[in-house]
Image (cartoon, grey):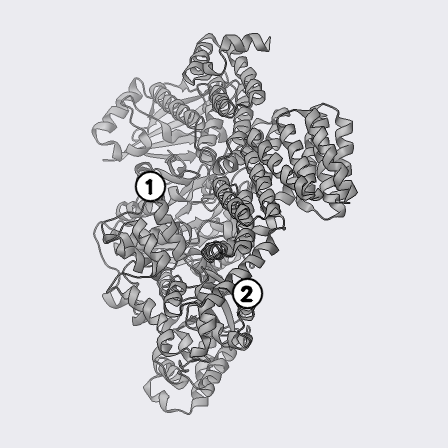
Amino acid sequence: MDAQLQIRHIGYQDDKPQFFVVRLDDGKNSSPVTLTPPEQTTVEGRPNSNLQQDLRWYLEKFLDYPFDPETFTAERVQDALHGWGEQCFATLFQGQALLWFHTARQQGLENLTLKIASNDPRVLAWPWEALRDPDGTTLAHTCRIERQVDKVNDPLPLPENLPQDCINILLVIARPYGDNDVGFHALSRPMIELLRKQQLPVHIDVLRPPTFDQLRNTLHQRRGFYHIVHFDGHGGYGEAGHTGSPHAFKGLQGMLIFEDAQAEPAPVTAEQLTQLIAEYRIPIMVLNACQSARIDERADDAFASVAAALLKAGIRSVVAMGYNLYVSGAQQFVPAFYQRLLTSGKVAEATRAGRQAMRAHDGRVCARGEFPLQDWLVPVLYQQDAVTLPAFTQVSPRRSPDADNLLPEEARELGDYGFIGRERAVQTLERARLQQPQAAFLIHGMAGVGKTILAKGFLHWLQDTNGLGAGAFWFSFDAIRNTEYVINELVDALFGTNARAAPLEQKLTALVQTLREQPFLLVWDNFESVSGIAGTEVTALLTDDDRNLLKKLLKQLRGGKTKVLITSRSPENWLTPQECYRLPLSGLQGEELWEYCNAVVRDLGLKIDRKNQDFLAIINELDGHPLAIRAILLRLNERSAAALLTELKQQFAGAEGDESTRQIYAALSIFNQSLPDFFAPILQLIGLHKRYVERDHVEQMLLFSGDQSGKLLLEGCFPALENAGLLQHHGHGLYSSHPALCSYLTLKYPVIKARQHAFINMMGRYAEYIAPKPAHEQHLPFLVHSANLYHALSLAESLQMGTHFIALAQSLAMHEYYVSNFDLAKSLLKRLVSKAIELKMLSFEAAAYHKLGLISQAQKNLINAQDWYKKSLELNEKLGKESDMADNFHNLGTTAMNQRNFSAAEHWFKKSLAINQKLSREIFIANIFHNLGFIATEMNDYKKAKDYYKNALLLKEKNGDEASVATTYHQLGMVLEQEKDFSEAERFYSKSLEIKEKQGNAEGAAKTYHQLGSLFQEQKNFPVAEYWCKKALIIWERNNQEMDAARVYDQLGIIAFIQESDEAAMEWFLKALLIFSNFSDMHHFMITAEHYRGIIKCAAPSTQIIAQKRWQEAGLDQTITLDQLEQQLQ
C-alpha cells in the first residue's frame, strides 16, 4: 500500500522557515518546526561560504580539478550535506510525524512518497533529496521524493484519445554548439537500444528539425498523442551559457536552448514554453537540460525555473535537473528512468530508479579520466498531480518479427559489435537530410573505416525514432552492372512488377515524381565500383551512359523529399557539388574509440588498459580505423601489447582467419593484379611515409632521385590509391594512408638507396623550412609529419647522411621543446652534438648547446642553463658569429633575471643589445627592451617599465611578431595591476590571451590565466580568481611544469586563506613549498613560507597545531625550521 507524507512550508519564524509534516491519507499534520536552510549551514574549513554554494561547487566545478586539496573540500561538502540531511530529518520527523514514518517503513519505504510543498523559490532550491533517516539511509534512494508548488491551478484533464496500449515519446535533441557540444545521441541511443531489446511498447519520434516552431507544429498535428516530451539539450537558470565541454550540459536563465533553422542556438524562455505546452496537455516532460529545475534566492517567483513553470502550464510531472549534469551521469539516469517508468507507470518511482543507477555507477568523465561524483541528487521531480501510465510488467512485443520491414534486408545486421559511436556523423547526416538541397550525400573514406556500418546504423537510428519516412531501399553497387536494374527495382516496389515493362523514360518520369513527393531513403553502397580505378585493371562496372543516367536521376531528385545515401572509398569527383553533398569519414575518436576497442577484446576475455603506453601506441598507429583495430587487437590472445606494437611497426599482420583481415588484404590486392609496374617508384616513396603523405613532396623526391616522368605518374597513382580506399585526400595534396598500406608497400616494393636519399633530402628540407617559424605555426606541420620526420632521422643516421641528420634532429628537438617534451628534446640534441663533433661542425654544436640551455631554463635548472649558454658562447666567439653571440648574451641575461640577479642580467642584455643594434636585428632588440621592462617592474620603477614595454611593442608590431606582442601585452597588464589600474590591466591581459589562444599557445595562455587569477583575487572576486588559476593549473600539471604549477598552488592558497579556509590554504601552500624546495628556489620558497606562517599566526589554536605538524611531516624542517623561518622573517 502506498503512503504519502507531505513536508509543507508554512512561513517563517525569526528568519527561519517553518514546516509541518502532513499525512495526506487523513490530512493530519505534525507540530510546526523550523529548519536551518543550507545557505545558513557552513562546511568545515569554509567559514565564508555555505552549504548551498559549496554543493553547487561540488556538483558543477569540482571535476574541473579533482585533485588534492580540492578532494578534501569535496569530502567535507559531502559530510556537511549528510549532516544537514540528518538534522532536517530529525527535526521534521519527531513525535507523531516519526510514528507516521515508522509505519511507512514497515510497509516498505519504496512505497512511500515524500512531497515537498512550498511557494518560496529558496525552499524549493534546497537539496531535499539529501534527507537521511537515523539509520543513515538517504531517502532519495529508498522512497520517492517530489516537489509541489501551492500557487498553481489543478491540471486540465488529460486528452481523451491518449493511447493506453503504447507509450509515445517525442524526443527533442538539440545540439547547437558545434564540435564542442555533447554527442548527438549520447543519451538517446542507449535509452532506445534498451527499450528495443526489452521489446517494450514504446513509440519514439525525434523532432526533426529540433526547432521551437517544429515542436509547435508537431504537437498541433498529433494532439493528444504524446505521453512524454523529452528535451535532450542545454538549458537552465542563471548566467553563463554553454560550457564549451562535450561532457556537460548548461544553459541560460530560465530557458531551454533549441536550434534555429541554421542549427544555431535558439533560446526559448520558460514563459514561451508554457504558452505552447499549456494548449496540448502533455502529461510528462523530461528535461535532461542542466539547471532546468534550478531556482534560488534571486527569484521572487516560484515559477522562475523551467520545471516549475511547466507545472503552471498544466504538465502533471516534470523531471528536470537542479544543477549542471554530466553526460556520463545522464547516461546512467535516462535508461534506468525509462525502464522503471514503463514497468511501473510511475514517474516518481522511475526518478528514484534513475538516482539509484547514478549512485551505483558514479564514475564521471573529467580531467582524471573518470572520478566518482555523488551527483544522484541532480535530477529532481516536480509533480503537481501524479499521472500513472500503463505499466508493462511483462515482455509484450508490440510488433511481429517482421515489423522491421521498413529496413532493407541488407541493413538489418549490424555486425559483431553493433553500431558504436559516430555521433557527430549521425548528426551531420540528420542535418544534411533536412538542410541540404542535394538529393545525395556521400560518405567517403578509406577501406574499413566504417562507411557501410555507418549507413546501416543510421538506418537503424531512423527506424527506431520513426524517421524513415516512406521507407528505405538498399543497393550494393559491387554487384550491379547497369543503372536500369536500380530503376526497375524501385519501380517494381512502388508501382508493381508490370510497371517494369514500361519504356525507360516513362519509368524514370513516374519514379522521379513519386520520389520527390514521398520521403524515401535510398542507400547506394560500395559505389566506388561504379567508376572503377582509372589507370589500373580495375574496370568500371557501369558504362558512361549508365553513370550519366545516375547523374540525371540525382539532378531530378534535387530539392525533393527522397534522399540518396552513398558510401564509397572514392570522393566520386565525377558527381558535382550540386548533385552530391560530401561527408568524409575518418577513424573513431575519443570515447567511441575506447568503446569499440573494448568490444573487440571482450570476446578474448580482456579489458583495455588505457594507461598501457604500448597499447596507446598501437591505437595511435591504427588511427581509429575499426577494421584495422579489429584485425590487430584480436591477436592479443597470442601476443602482448608490446610484442604487437613491435611487429606492427614492421608489418601489418591481422588475426588469421578473421573477416577483418580478409577484407584488408582484399583492399591491398590491387597491388597484385591491377596497378601498372611503372607506378613502382611512387609506391616505393609512399611506402617510406608514416600516416600522411604529400603529393608535392613525392614529386620533389622523384626529381631528387632522377625520375623525370614523375609528375604524370602522380596524376594516375594517387587517385588510384584513393579509389582503392588506401589513401584519403584532405585537400591541398595532403593524403592520410591506410594503417596497413605503408608497411605493405615497404615489403612489396623494396626501396632503392637513391629514393631513400630523396626521401631524407625532402624531409630535411622540410624540417629546415618549418624550423624558423613561430611555435604556433609549427604545430600543424609537426602534427601531420612528425612520424615522417622521425623516420627520415632514423634513415639519415643509418645511411650516414650527417648534415640531413643534424637538420632533422635540430628541427624535431625544437618542436619537442615547444610542446614541453623536454626529455625527448634533450635526447635529440645530445645525439646532434655527437654528430656535430664527429663531423667537426662547430656552428651546429654551438647551436645545440644553446638549445640545451633553453631546455634547462624551461625546467628551472638555471645553473645548467648558464653552463650550456657559456659553452655555446665559447664556440661562437671562436667562430666570430656575432648574431649567435648576441643570442647567448641575451639568454645569459634571462637566466640571471630568473635568478633575480638584475645587475648581471642588465649587463648581459646590454652586451646583446649592442650587437643587435649594430646588426639592425629589430625583433631581438624588442625582446631586450621587453626584458629590461621586466627588470624595471621588479624594481618597482613602473614608469620606466612601461617605457621599455612600449618601445618593445613598437618594434614587435612593426615586424608583425604577433606572438611576441602578446607577451608584452601580458607584461603591461602586470605593471598596470601593480598600479591598481585593474580595468586597464584586464584589457591588456585579454588582448594577450586572445592572441595566445588563437595561436594555440597553451603555455603562454596559462601564464595569462594565472595572472587573471591574481587580478581578480586583488579585487576580492574569489570564484573568478579560482576559475582562472585552475585553468592555468591544468596546463602546467599536464605539461609537468612543476615550478609554474607551484606558483599557482601558492595563489590558490592565498585565495583560500583570505576566505578563512585555513586547512585548504595549508595544503595548497605545502604543495608549493615542496616544489620550491626541490628546485632550490629560495626566493619563491620564502614568499610562500611567509604565507604559511600567516596561518600559524592567525588561525585557531587547533589549526596552528595542525599547521606546525604538517610542516614537519612534509620534511620542510630539512630546508628551514619554523623557528628559523620566524627569525628570518622578523
Q: Nearer the viewer, residue 677 or 726?
A: 677
As drawn, is 1061 to the left or to the right of 383? right
Q: Residue at x 62, y 46 (%)?
A: 843
Q: CA distance from mark 2 to mark 1?
A: 56 Å
Q: Residue at x 57, y 22 (%)?
A: 1084
Q: Residues within 10 Å of mark 1 (few under 14, many from 20)?
A: many
Q: Nearer the viewer, residue 531 or 184?
A: 531
Residue 917, given in percent of the width and then of the height, sits at 78, 41
Q: Amino acid at mark 1?
A: Gly
Residue 278, given in percent of the width and then of the height, sits at 47, 48
Q: Which residue is mark 2?
A: 697
Q: Quadrant of the N terminus?
A: top left
**Vertical placement of 737 versus 996: above or below?**
below
**SS at circle 2:** helix
**Vertical placement of 1021 versus 532: above or below?**
above
**Vertical placement of 389 versus 979: above or below?**
below
Q: Which residue is mark 1?
A: 354
Residue 730, given in percent of the width and then of the height, sits at 52, 64
